Amino acid sequence: MDAFKINGYETCQAEDTCGGTLRGSSGLISSFDFPSGDSTSAGGAAGGLGSSGECKWTILADPGDTISLVFTEFQMEEKSDYLEVEGSDPASIWITGMNIPAPIISNTNWLRLHFVTESNHRHKGFRAQYQVKSSGELKSRGVKLLPGKDNTNKLSLMNEGGFKQVSNYCPDPGESENGKRTGSNFSIGATAQFTCDEDHVLQGSKTITCQRVAEVFAAWSDHRPICKVKTCGSNLQGPSGTFTSPNFPIQYESNSQCVWIITASDPNKVIQINFEEFDLEIGYDSLTIGDGGEVGDSKTIIQVLTGSFVPDLIVSMSHQMWLHLQSDESVGSIGFKINYKGKMPCNHR
């Protein structure tokens, strides 16, 4: 067994492995080759996957304490690399891809991280900061905020362990490929808005907010959305009509990104859709339905449908509704046939 120290606590790990049990009040965790593939890095980081394809960490705090985990870097090969986090709500979170995940806060005094890769180390992996929040910390330690050297950027958090830097700024969220970002202020409370280029559809939150996490970290409320090329779909308008998935009733194509926007001819009316047929490859292909004309904005989603169960009537809240069909690279199903019409809302007098 090899031993090393993180924030003054000794941690043991077997030879030729990575990970371990972390007991510090705060620290860093990084996956293989991030930033240099060392077992530990400056600032109390644990990482270094080396030649192994699997790594496990456990962050352990005192009973009654909770743990926040904030990702500062995240680059994984989708479907080949993944990070599983246990100990929060939901009980198990699986993360992959190239977007920085939202912060994770435990619902107990531990978090377990399980990282697996099969992609020959083509991406950096991940880097995250953790912070333990004690249930009695503010009362027992007499925490006091003092101005730091740069009042606009950081504050010094004084406690019995010394001084820690409290960040008032979120990391640069970057811009989505094939899209644009509005907003260059990354301070607490600031927002960033994202749009996609023409012929691309946004997936994720259109607007994210920089927020405080566990009194020390600043993190975005959600990860940066992505823009995927639109392969089919149309803008529909009128009192009523019918549309289908591509090739219906023959199976739709793989890797589809189809978008339909329905607009009522009367702006005082809402949109009602009913399904004559519906069959998507369950768990792999989906039809997302949202209110309004902001396609892909997670805040407007009404339902996400998959499988072969024919859905009930769906009614929008406004005079517009969007539908987004996504299929993976495997064989699909026959798809769907949908009738739509504009109608007066139920509360109309």
Image (spheres, rainbow, N blue to C red):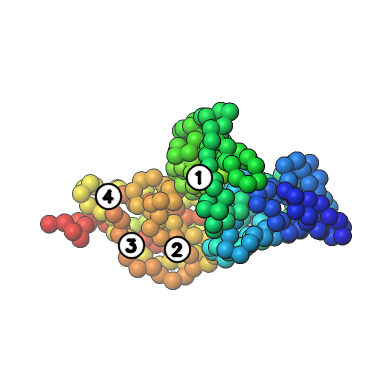
Residue 175 located left or right of residue 190: right
How far apart are the two marked residues, 3 and 2, measured between alpha carbons? 11 Å
Asked if the residue at tag 4 contacts the one at tag 3, i.e. Cβ–Cβ closer than 8 Å, the answer is no
Q: Given the image, on which type of amino acid does mark 3 rest?
A: Ile
How far apart are the two marked residues, 1 and 2, measured between alpha carbons? 34 Å
Q: Earlier in the sequence, mark 4 or mark 1?
A: 1
**Nearest the eye: 178 or 137:** 137
Residue 16 located left or right of residue 90: right
Q: Given the image, on which type of amino acid does mark 4 rest?
A: His
**Other-residue count near label 2 (Cα within 10 Å), few / some / many at <14 / 14–19 / ≥20:** many
Name the residue tied to disc 3: 314
Name the residue tied to disc 2: 305
Q: Which mark is residue 212?
A: 1
Eye-nearest disc, 4 or 1: 1
How far apart are the two marked residues, 1 and 3, measured between alpha carbons? 37 Å
How far apart are the two marked residues, 4 and 1, measured between alpha carbons? 36 Å
> In which quadrant is the C terminus drawn?
bottom left
Name the residue tied to disc 4: 319
Q: Earlier in the sequence, mark 2 or mark 4?
A: 2
- Residue in the image at 22% along x and 52% along y: 269
Secondary structure beneath label 4: loop
Q: Earlier in the sequence, mark 3 or mark 4?
A: 3
The percent coordinates of residue 78 (x first, y second) are: 65, 52
Secondary structure beneath label 2: strand
Q: Which mark is residue 278?
A: none
Q: Earlier in the sequence, mark 1 or mark 3?
A: 1
Q: Given the image, on which type of amino acid does mark 2 rest?
A: Leu
